[in-house]
Amino acid sequence: MSQEKIRLSGKIVHVFAHRFVVETSGGAVLADLTPHGAEAVTLRIGANVDLEGEMKPSELKVTRFACAGERVTIEHKKKHGHDHHPPVDPAAAIEAARAAGFEPTGTPRRKPKHFEIQGRRNGQDYELHVELGGRIRKARLVGDDHETA
């Protein structure tokens, strides 16, 4: 999903470590420099800034910062899907479901710390959350807001 690249100008009204709020003609925008980027610039409340970056749902990831003649380019580390998670065999989730008396009815979906898998037991459908080690930590009856073990 590609994010929108934008440019904006405004006045710094709040500073929170490497994040800061810029009041623009269109309203307030939360901006992120990263801790490394914050070491390269001086953030001062009341300073007029020109920024470029990627607009994410919650903030502007600043890639270029300009203030009173100071111009800095900031690199942001990119996240690559689930590449930062160790590989884990989904067969462990299927085996855990079967060992607990569930018949898996779907393919395990990888989450950062567990798998989610659909299963049937006693004629009822469940959504199972299976830890990467194979322990079922949650079994929710589909269509029900209550959890069972």
Image (spheres, helix red, strand yellow):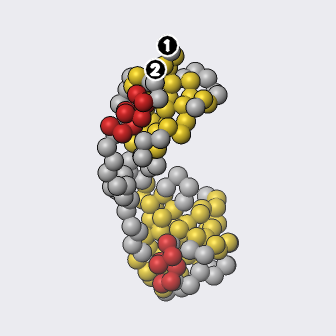
Please state the horizontal and vertical placement of residue 98, each as a whole percent of the image.
40, 28
Q: Name which quarter of the figure residue 103 lies in.
A: top left
Q: SS for tag 1?
A: loop
Q: Is residue 118 above or below residue 122?
A: below
Which residue does the numbered mark 1 point to in the structure image? Answer: 123
Which of the pair 5/137 is nearer the observer? Answer: 137
Q: Is residue 91 above or below residue 26?
A: above
Q: SS for tag 2?
A: strand
Residue 11 visible, this orientation = no
Q: Name which quarter of the figure residue 17 lies in.
A: bottom right
Label 2 to label 1, Cα distance in Å? 6 Å
What residue type is disc 1 on?
Answer: Gly
Farthest front residue? 99
Q: Which mark is residue 68?
A: none
Which residue does the numbered mark 2 point to in the structure image? Answer: 120
Residue 39 visible, this orientation = yes
- Mark 1 neighbour class, 10 Å CA radius: few under 14, some 14 to 19, many 20 or more: few
Farthest top residue? 123
What residue type is disc 2 on?
Answer: Arg
- Mark 2 neighbour class, 10 Å CA radius: few under 14, some 14 to 19, many 20 or more: many
Rendered residue at 48%/64% (across/down): 61
Please state the horizontal and vertical placement of residue 88, each as a whole percent of the image.
33, 48
Q: Is residue 91 above or below residue 54?
A: above
Pointers 2 and 1 in contact (C-beta within 8 Å): yes
